[in-house]
Image (cartoon, coloured by chain):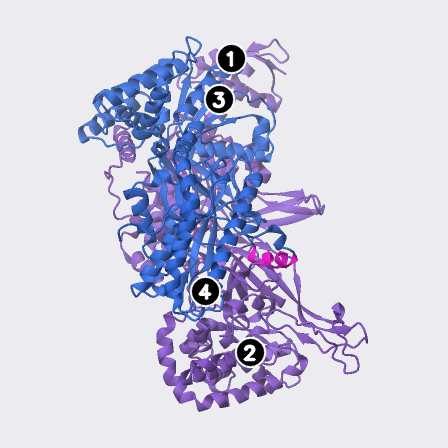
Chain colours: A blue, B purple
């Protein structure tokens, strides 16, 4: 084949159909496709990644939903917020003597029902939302890509789309032409198709009006992928076909109320006018650096160190010239849970900045949260007050009436940053919700786990959240790994940072965080000796302190872009801890 | 093929939930029809639809006149089929070969199954007539009726509406029938019903009720997650938790119409594929008015229906997933059999139903809604089915309480494991492998996990089998980790922190239901962990009040409530695992355990084992700790963990042992126990001491029995051997030597735990009191001036040069004297009265 006779972008279903026909044509029976792909994924993978058309695929969001046509290829970036189970559909059926497929479609375009031997396949339904706490720069990264392709697609779509339809028709009919059903059905189909299109376009306009402005959920239908691949709270990019159910709300009258009772339509609560459907062809997990605009090229060998220095300088400025705090802040921003042994989440480094009063928090706290917003893709801030604790629902809760998981504040994507401002906290009585919430926060900070409430039982989900606590004294509600008394010497400067520097820092944080790390056996000996010696002199040092030092050692050496702990960096850890201990006295 | 009227299961789908009770009958009629169609098909495909085009006369199980015609009619069918039996048998093979292809989506295959109605019928007949339980005595076999014949008689006696059939029995009697039943449940069950009704009408021709068959206890049970399209229209068995029940839906079975013009009542019209066909013309010859018929609601027949949502049990959910749910359709007696929150095991037929685009449209979406047509429901946590089912009760003992099923292979593995000579050490090592050393503590915890035998005497006295353990230790000695670990491992563990627990939170409290105003009992942690382990962290920080609640729980194993009109005694057969910090956060070896932990001795004596986990400044342990944490952080496989059982095996081992092993004391062991106990008591009687020190109390011997039983259980042994007892003594001694060492004498002193003061200490105090009394007698006049305490202290020191006397001791002594009315004690001054 010279070039594909279809347009993967504007008419992905045409491509699906073509590959299906090709596979059938090569002698396979549809039953061999049960839970398998027949080459569509390869085709799209080739198209998107090998030919790098991915950037031309529009990203589905509030802005783009206005003009994106249904049945075109879109991508959606979001977090898996809930899983709605599996759905059975007629995957392949015989229309006359021709096999057709419904894969990646909500409706069959040809009447089914009568056909014997149709294959029933299943697909998974995932309810996805934009990543909670996503910062504007990470979003705009995607926006740019759209602008680039917007013109392109809008030019092409009309012409291309029609051509394609015709091309497909032309291609389809010779095959079925030998059949007894000739042009009438073809006409009908064509009309159907057009009707369908206009109808969908109509509902497309209603979509905009009804969608919740704050969140833009999307129901993603996943085909043929192992269950373990997609997990709750993972951040994914889904590339697939956008469709709208043509279910008109008026149609579900009394009949449905009875019918829904036992089918318990999860979808009733998610009408397509509110939640667009995406039939996912290809999905990939996103890491922090997928949200960056550009990846800077490392020019010099010292480049990482330079970026580190400039970032440290920036943090020092933000923290009112407190160098030690800035060092800890840098390590904190780089931390992540890299392994779990039993109940211990290894690698977390929560930071508690103390000695902040209500007044100073308005200066430094705002600056700090602004700086973090600019550096990390996902960040959230919780003002910890008695009222907040007693009122808010931190843990996600299952609502059995709608069969949905109601999101809570603590349902966060991996690698999110969470600031908890405890300076607002005053004395008061917590109600039972408050006590529960306080316990949840404590579990999160200690074990990096969040309990999801399933009414009849609780289920623990692992999390990887960087926690920064701002408080006046040492926080007892949230025992952080590091207590850092804050000693600013000047009011933080709020200078505007160059975009280029910001981008470099973001890239630095995203990359350095995921560096692998190891330890040489000699160094291990030194570390062990140091730990033993420290414990011999001070019996109050326990495993938690050891753990903290080792995490810090790992993070310090990664912050220099190195992958194994050196003596120099180990000394730095000890020096930092000494300085911190001084302050604690 | 006829497109819309075809009874293909999917099109049939929407109808069958509405009509699932009558549909099996419908299917029966169509299965012979299918038989026809298969033969027809061989001749020529074109005639196939005709088999379907003539739907069988609609009949319902509920039609009163039906019981006789039905068997008659079905009896005539096999005769038809009999002609083709040889051919259908030969044809049965190829179609069963294509069994994989035989997806329910292909109606030709579904109807053209390899089921020969007659074969199945006779097989079922044989099964019902002749099946006998293996455990029924062999000799009387011939004279006695089969298990199910007896059951049928019983059903007739109590006028029941169903007969429960254990699928295991079916399998054991005729595995071929079982396979057919699971694969084509609709057809086979319909035949089953017919056969059953035949038998019933033979026994009692006047029996009017329709008896249905309910299958339960399938050989294999599916997980909800693994249900896939190939399971559609098959019999499945699922475990799950009910999360939602709909209200009861009255479902129409028979409709009666009345003509508005002439008032003529139509004959009952039976639901046909989920629809009632409203007559368009009045049937009365004289009237024949068009569109005049109206439904008469109160003359129609309705049946109960309920839709229940079943959710996966938490342990089936993979990491990073949310639970799946499935809808269940319940009919008649099954309605309200389960409430939300119940864990049930459900047997039913997995069905799919296509979704119509609109209520009036015949076109359907390509989607399916799936549900399970429920045949049988069993509450798993009660280990028996519906309360009124008599047969299930004797089967109940087979079921595991904790939902852990042990198949033969697993049991064999566990037994194999238990035969290893080092099983005790291996288990010890496998327990919390990330916490090193503390081996004796782990052994104690192991004993707690396995537990002893609870004993209830006919006189009503009961002895607990649960081992209670208290860990006292310095901060940072991984007590909490041990607790967390045990909590995760134990069958029904509850983890609380002493600081956050109140008395009612631990036991039970009475609250008023805001809606109904009824008072209800809410269980606390201890009641909830009945037959489990209740882990209480920071025991020392618990309020006095809360702790006193534990007294009852730890010895009597009940929680008694008497408030707000509710007097109740709840079971709390729980082992308590508590950990505490010493009073000054670090253990002070100069003080006694009681002073260190600051717990009331009454409570302390209820712990079987009290471990002191002291953080000794030992370089070796520190190095071990450092190594461990370094390897934790750098993923260094330094600490080889071979020879360690994984947590699943460990749990299985523990629960198997707890369930199936009830060790008894051997004579030898009992002798050793007595000998050891006597020895322990005698040890207190050390030479040179005038006062006898009680070293062991009867509570200790109970502890020892429990421990040795637990040790026998560890070996999966039914007998407690002598070495178990010796090990139990060793464990007790290891724990006691640390905790009950009297630091002034160096011997084990149980008094220290029971009263908080050691015998020698008590003697010293008495000496001090008498010395003080002497001094006061000497120095002070009756009613004379008062003396400062410090002066008295000087005097005492002068008199007794040997022992050191502290001001505090003296103060206590003077307070004792004041209590006797010998002196008046005011602030610092003492005055004789």
The picture places residue B716, in percent across and down from the top left corner, at 36, 57
Q: Are marks 3 and 1 on the same chain?
A: yes
Residue pictured at 43% horizontal, 22% vertical: A352
Q: CA distance from mark 2 to mark 4?
A: 51 Å
A343 lies above or below B385: above
Residues packed near mark 3 inside 10 Å, few (<14), some (14 to 19) or many (20 plus): many
Q: Are marks 2 and 4 on the same chain?
A: no
Main SS of residues in magenta: helix
Label whose residue precedes the other's in the sequence (3 or 2) = 2
Which mark is nearer the camera, 2 or 4? Answer: 4
Label 3 residue SS:
helix
Image-based side of A529 in relation to B194, left or right? left
Closer to the camera in the image, A187 or A367:
A187
The residue beneath circle 4 is A183
Image-based side of A262 in relation to B582, left or right? right
The picture places residue B340, in percent across and down from the top left corner, at 58, 54
Label 2 residue SS:
helix
Label whose residue precedes the other's in the sequence (3 or 1) = 3
> Disc 2: which chain?
B
> Disc 3: which chain?
B
Instruction: Give the total number of marks visible in the rendering.
Output: 4
Residues packed near mark 2 inside 10 Å, few (<14), some (14 to 19) or many (20 plus): many
The residue beneath circle 3 is B768
Tell me which segment is drawn in magenta: A254-264
């Amino acid at each position: 084949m010279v070039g594909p006779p279809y347009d993967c972008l504007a008419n992905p279903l045409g491509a699906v159909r073509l590959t299906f026909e090709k596979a059938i044509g090569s002698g396979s029976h549809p039953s061999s496709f049960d839970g398998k792909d027949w080459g569509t994924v390869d085709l799209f993978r080739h198209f998107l990644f090998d030919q790098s058309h991915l950037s031309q695929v529009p990203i589905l969001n509030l802005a783009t939903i206005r003009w994106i046509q249904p049945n075109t290829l879109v991508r959606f970036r979001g977090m898996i917020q809930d899983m709605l189970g599996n759905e059975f559909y007629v995957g392949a059926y015989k229309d006359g003597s021709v096999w057709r497929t419904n894969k990646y479609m909500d409706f069959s375009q040809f009447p089914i029902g009568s056909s014997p031997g149709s294959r029933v396949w299943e697909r998974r339904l995932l309810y996805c939302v934009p990543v909670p706490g996503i910062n504007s720069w990470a979003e705009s990264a995607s926006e740019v890509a759209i602008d680039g392709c917007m013109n392109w697609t809008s030019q092409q779509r009309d012409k291309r789309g029609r051509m394609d339809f015709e091309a497909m028709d032309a291609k389809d009919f010779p095959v079925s032409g030998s059949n007894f059903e000739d042009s009438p059905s073809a006409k009908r189909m064509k009309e159907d198709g057009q009707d369908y299109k206009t109808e969908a376009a109509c509902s497309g306009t209603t979509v905009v009006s009804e969608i919740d402005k704050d969140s833009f959920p999307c129901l993603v239908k996943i085909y043929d992928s192992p269950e373990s691949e997609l997990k709750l709270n993972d951040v994914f990019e889904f590339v697939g076909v956008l469709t709208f159910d043509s279910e008109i709300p008026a149609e579900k009258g009394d009949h449905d109320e009875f019918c829904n009772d036992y089918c318990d339509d999860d979808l009733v609560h998610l009408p397509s006018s509110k939640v667009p459907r995406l039939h996912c062809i290809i999905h990939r997990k996103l890491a922090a650096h997928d949200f960056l605009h550009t990846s800077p090229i490392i020019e010099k060998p010292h480049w990482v160190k330079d970026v580190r220095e400039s970032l440290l300088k920036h943090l020092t400025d933000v923290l009112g010239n407190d160098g030690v705090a800035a060092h800890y802040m840098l390590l904190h921003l780089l931390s992540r849970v890299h392994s779990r042994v039993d109940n211990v989440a290894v690698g977390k480094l929560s930071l508690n900045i103390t000695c902040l009063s209500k007044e100073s928090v308005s200066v430094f706290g705002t600056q700090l949260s602004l700086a973090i917003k600019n550096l990390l893709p996902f960040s959230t801030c919780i003002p910890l007050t008695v009222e907040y604790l007693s009122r808010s629902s931190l843990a996600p809760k299952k609502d059995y009436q709608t069969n949905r998981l109601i999101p809570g504040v603590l349902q966060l994507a991996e690698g999110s940053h969470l600031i908890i401002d405890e300076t607002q906290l005053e004395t008061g009585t917590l109600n039972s919700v408050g006590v529960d919430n306080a316990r949840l926060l404590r579990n999160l900070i200690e074990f990096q786990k969040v309990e999801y409430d399933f009414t009849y039982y609780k289920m623990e989900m692992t999390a990887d959240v960087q926690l920064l606590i701002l408080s006046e004294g040492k926080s007892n509600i949230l025992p952080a790994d590091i207590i850092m008394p804050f000693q600013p010497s000047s009011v933080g400067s709020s200078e505007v940072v160059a975009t280029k520097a910001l981008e470099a820092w973001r890239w630095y944080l995203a990359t350095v965080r995921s560096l692998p790390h190891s330890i040489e056996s000699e160094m291990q000996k030194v570390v062990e000796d140091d730990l033993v010696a420290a414990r011999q002199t001070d019996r109050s040092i326990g495993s938690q302190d050891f753990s903290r030092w080792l995490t810090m050692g790992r993070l310090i050496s990664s912050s220099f872009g190195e992958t194994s702990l050196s003596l120099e960096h180990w000394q730095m850890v000890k020096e930092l801890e000494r300085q911190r201990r001084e302050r604690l006295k | 093929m006829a497109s819309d009227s075809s009874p293909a299961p999917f099109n049939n789908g929407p109808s069958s939930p509405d009509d699932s009770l009558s549909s099996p009958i419908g299917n029966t009629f169509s299965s012979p029809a299918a038989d026809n169609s298969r033969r027809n098909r061989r001749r020529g495909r074109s005639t196939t639809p005709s088999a379907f085009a003539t739907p069988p006369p609609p009949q319902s199980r509920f039609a009163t006149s039906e019981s006789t015609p039905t068997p008659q009619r079905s009896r005539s069918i096999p005769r038809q089929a009999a002609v083709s039996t040889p051919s259908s048998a030969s044809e049965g093979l190829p179609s069963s070969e294509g069994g994989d292809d035989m997806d329910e989506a292909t109606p030709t295959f579904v109807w053209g199954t390899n089921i020969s109605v007659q074969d199945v019928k006779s097989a079922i007949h044989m099964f019902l007539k002749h099946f006998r339980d293996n455990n029924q005595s062999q000799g009387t076999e011939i004279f006695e009726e089969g298990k199910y014949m007896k059951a049928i008689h019983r059903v007739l006696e109590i006028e029941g509406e169903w007969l429960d059939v254990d699928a295991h029995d079916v399998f054991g009697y005729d595995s071929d029938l079982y396979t057919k039943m699971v694969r084509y449940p609709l057809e086979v069950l319909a035949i089953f019903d017919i056969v059953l009704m035949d038998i019933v009408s033979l026994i009692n021709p006047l029996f009017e009720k329709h008896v249905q068959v309910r299958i339960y206890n399938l050989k294999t049970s599916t997980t909800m997650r693994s249900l896939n399209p190939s399971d559609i229209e098959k019999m499945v068995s699922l475990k799950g938790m009910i999360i939602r029940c709909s209200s009861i839906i009255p479902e129409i079975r028979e409709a009666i119409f009345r003509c508005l013009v002439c008032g003529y009542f139509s004959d009952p019209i039976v639901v046909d594929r989920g629809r009632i066909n409203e007559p368009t013309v009045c049937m009365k010859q004289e009237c024949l008015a068009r569109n005049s018929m109206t439904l008469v609601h109160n003359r129609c027949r309705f049946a109960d229906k309920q839709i229940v949502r079943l959710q996966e049990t938490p342990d089936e959910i993979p990491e990073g997933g949310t639970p799946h749910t499935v809808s269940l359709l319940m009919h008649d007696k099954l309605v309200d059999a389960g409430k939300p929150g119940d864990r049930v095991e459900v047997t039913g037929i997995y069905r799919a139903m296509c979704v119509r685009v609109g209520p009036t449209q015949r076109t359907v979406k390509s989607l399916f809604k799936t549900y399970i047509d429920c045949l049988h429901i069993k509450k798993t946590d009660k280990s028996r089915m519906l309360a009124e089912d008599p047969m299930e009760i004797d089967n109940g003992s087979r079921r595991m309480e904790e939902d852990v099923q042990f198949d033969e292979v697993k049991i064999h593995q566990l037994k194999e494991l238990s035969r290893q000579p080092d099983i005790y050490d291996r288990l010890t090592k496998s327990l919390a492998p990330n916490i090193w050393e503390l081996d004796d503590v782990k052994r104690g915890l192991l004993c707690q996990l396995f537990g002893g035998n609870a004993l209830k005497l006919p006189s009503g006295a009961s002895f607990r089998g649960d081992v209670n353990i208290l860990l006292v230790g310095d901060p940072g000695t991984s007590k909490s980790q041990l607790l967390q670990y045990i909590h995760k491992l134990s069958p029904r563990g509850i983890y609380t922190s002493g600081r956050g627990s109140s008395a009612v939170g631990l036991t039970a409290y009475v609250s008023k239901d805001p809606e109904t105003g009824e008072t209800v009992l809410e269980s606390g942690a201890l009641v909830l962990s009945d037959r489990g382990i209740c882990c209480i962290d920071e025991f020392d920080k618990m309020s006095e009040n809360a702790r006193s609640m534990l007294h009852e729980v730890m010895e009597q194993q009940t929680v008694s409530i008497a408030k707000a009109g509710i007097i109740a005694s709840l079971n709390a057969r729980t082992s308590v695992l508590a950990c505490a910090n010493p009073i000054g956060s670090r253990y002070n070896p100069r003080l006694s355990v009681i002073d260190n932990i600051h717990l009331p001795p009454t409570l302390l004596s209820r712990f079987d084992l009290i471990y002191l986990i002291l953080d000794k400044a030992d370089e070796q342990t520190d190095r071990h700790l450092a190594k461990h944490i370094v390897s934790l952080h750098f993923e260094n496989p330094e600490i080889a963990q071979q020879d360690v059982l994984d947590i699943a095996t460990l749990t299985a081992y523990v629960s198997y042992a707890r369930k199936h092993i009830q060790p008894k004391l051997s004579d030898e062991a009992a002798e050793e126990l007595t000998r050891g106990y006597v020895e322990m008591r005698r040890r207190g009687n050390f030479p040179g001491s005038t006062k006898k020190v009680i070293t062991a109390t009867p509570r200790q011997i109970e502890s020892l029995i429990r421990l040795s039983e637990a040790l026998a259980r560890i070996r999966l042994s039914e007998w407690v051997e002598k070495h178990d007892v010796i090990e139990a003594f060793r464990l007790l001694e290891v724990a006691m030597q640390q905790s009950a060492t009297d630091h002034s004498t160096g011997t084990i002193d149980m008094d220290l735990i029971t009263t908080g003061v050691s015998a020698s200490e008590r003697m010293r105090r008495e000496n001090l009191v008498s010395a003080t009394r002497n001094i006061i007698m000497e120095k002070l006049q009756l009613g004379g001036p008062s003396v400062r305490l410090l002066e008295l202290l000087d005097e005492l020191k002068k008199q007794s040069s040997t022992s050191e006397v502290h001001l505090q001791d003296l103060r206590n002594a003077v307070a004792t004297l004041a209590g006797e009315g010998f002196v008046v004690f005011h602030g610092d001054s003492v005055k004789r009265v």
